[in-house]
Image (cartoon, rainbow, N blue to C red):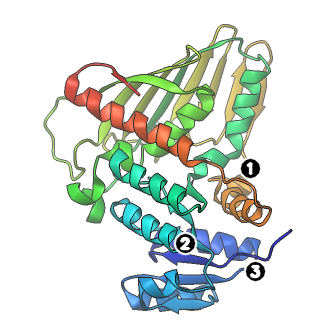
């Protein structure tokens, strides 16, 4: 490695921060981790739990600290833009937990601050690092199912939604924005092309829900390469298999069938194959966080880029516009 380990400070000490901090400590036992939370007791708790370097009592203290190179934002996304802009102004590089922001206006504020202050910024989109994704895209590139025509992703489970996720102001959208961005990312990755338009519908049925705006949605997406994508995403539809669903990629010469989370994949076409993911890193967090640090130390660009994340947020924005207009909307 060409540089020392960077000092990483987590802003927001909750469940997702604990996951990332644990991953980094296991991968790099000597890495310097610091913590900040509005609840100072949480910062101290995390400092002790992860043998951290510092626990900051105030946000300004960490932004002024020479011990912090990367600010890892793990708060609800309503606060991402404000925190990212402050970190950029202080010359800190930034990793933001998904989704990047509540809307495109906040996203543009982040990108403007990153550009103005010449800092690095990425989003912790772990689905980009799931091992089964590359195996599927390699199968497509190798012509195992001929020309891909339709990508169908299904993800539904009846989830108990409470706290800030039931607050319309803090959410800025519904299930598609907060959880569905993972599946939008997967859809774009499997299409291997930029989305150009989307038509979205949701059930016009009255029922009790704690999710603002929408808890169930279906998207039909057209991609630049001619492929069509379909995404069913729901936090409301029961699933006896606890979130396990089947998805497919239909090609001119075959079909790829896969469990939506990546538990297994079957290719049937010009070549038959079955494969399973790396269960030691099933969710991709290990590979993602390790890669962020390695790329930082070797001065390589982070992946995903803000441009890629922005494209996916534009798809979500267009989907919400489509719900209102009743028409397909350009991305």
Mark 3 lies on residue: 29
Which residue is drawn at the image coordinates 76% and 17% (left, top)? Answer: 144
Q: Residue at x 55, y 41 (%)?
A: 308
Query: Is 222 or 21 nearer to us in this picture?
Result: 222
Q: Position of residue 264 (x, y in %)?
A: 67, 37
- Look at the numbered disc 1 and give the secondary structure of its residue: loop
Whichever of labels 2 and 3 marks the residue nearer the N terminus, that label is 3
Q: Is residue 99 above or below residue 253?
A: below
The answer to whether residue 158 of the structure is visible from this angle is no
In the picture as drawn, the residue positioned furthest to the front comes out as 116
Q: Is residue 41 above or below residue 320?
A: below
Which of the two labelled residues, at mark 1 and mark 2, occupies the earlier sequence position? 2
Whole-percent x, y for residue 329 in the image: 33, 23
- Position of 251 with respect to 72 (left or right) is right
- The numbered disc on residue 298 is none
Q: Of all residues shown, which one is farthest toward the top?
A: 252
Q: How many labels were placed on the picture?
A: 3
The Cα–Cα distance between marks 3 and 1, rounded to whole angstroms, is 22 Å
Q: Which residue is mark 2?
A: 71
Look at the numbered discs 2 and 3 and tell me whether their residues touch, using CB distance below 8 Å.
Answer: no
Q: Residue 81's x, y, as percent? A: 39, 61
Quadrant that contains the N terminus: bottom right
- Given residues 173 and 3, the one toward you in this image is 3
Q: Secondary structure at mark 2?
A: strand
Badge 1 density bin: few <14, some 14–19, many ≥20, Cα 10 Å: some
Classed neighbour count for the residue bearing mark 3: other residues with Cα under 10 Å, few (<14), some (14–19), many (≥20) = few
Element at label 3:
loop
Category of crowding for the residue at label 2, using alpha-carbon neighbours closer than 10 angstroms: few (below 14), some (14–19), many (at least 20): many
In which image quadrant can residue 146 be found?
top right
| 286 on left or right of 233 | right
């Amino acid at each position: 490695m060409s540089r020392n380990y960077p000092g990483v400070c987590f802003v927001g000490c909750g469940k997702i921060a604990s996951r990332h901090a644990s991953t980094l400590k296991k991968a790099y036992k000597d890495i310097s981790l610091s913590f900040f939370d509005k609840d100072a007791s949480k910062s101290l708790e995390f400092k002790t739990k992860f043998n951290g370097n510092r626990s900051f009592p105030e946000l300004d203290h960490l932004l002024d600290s020479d011990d912090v190179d990367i600010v890892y934002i793990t708060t609800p996304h309503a606060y991402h833009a404000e925190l990212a802009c402050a970190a950029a102004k202080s010359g800190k590089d930034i990793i933001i937990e998904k989704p990047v922001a509540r809307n495109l206006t906040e996203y543009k504020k982040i990108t403007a601050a990153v550009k103005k202050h010449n800092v690095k910024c990425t989003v912790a989109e772990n689905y980009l690092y799931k091992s089964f994704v590359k195996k599927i895209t390699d199968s497509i590139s190798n012509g195992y199912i001929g020309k891909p025509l339709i990508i169908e992703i299904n993800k539904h489970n009846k989830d108990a939604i409470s706290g800030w996720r039931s607050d319309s102001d803090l959410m800025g959208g519904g299930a598609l924005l907060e959880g569905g961005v993972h599946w939008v990312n997967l859809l774009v990755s499997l299409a291997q092309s930029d989305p150009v338009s989307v038509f979205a519908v949701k059930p016009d049925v009255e029922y009790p829900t704690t999710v603002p705006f929408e808890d169930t949605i279906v998207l039909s997406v057209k991609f630049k390469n001619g492929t069509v994508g379909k995404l069913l995403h729901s936090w409301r539809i029961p699933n006896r298999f606890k979130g396990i669903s089947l998805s497919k990629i239909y090609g001119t010469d075959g079909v790829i069938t896969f469990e939506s989370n990546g538990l297994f994949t079957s290719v049937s076409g010009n070549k038959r194959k079955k494969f399973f993911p790396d269960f030691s890193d099933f969710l991709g967090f290990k590979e993602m966080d390790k890669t962020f640090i390695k790329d930082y130390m070797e001065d390589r660009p982070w992946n995903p880029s803000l441009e890629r994340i922005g494209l996916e947020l534009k798809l979500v924005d267009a989907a919400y516009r489509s719900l209102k207009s009743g028409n397909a909307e350009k991305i």
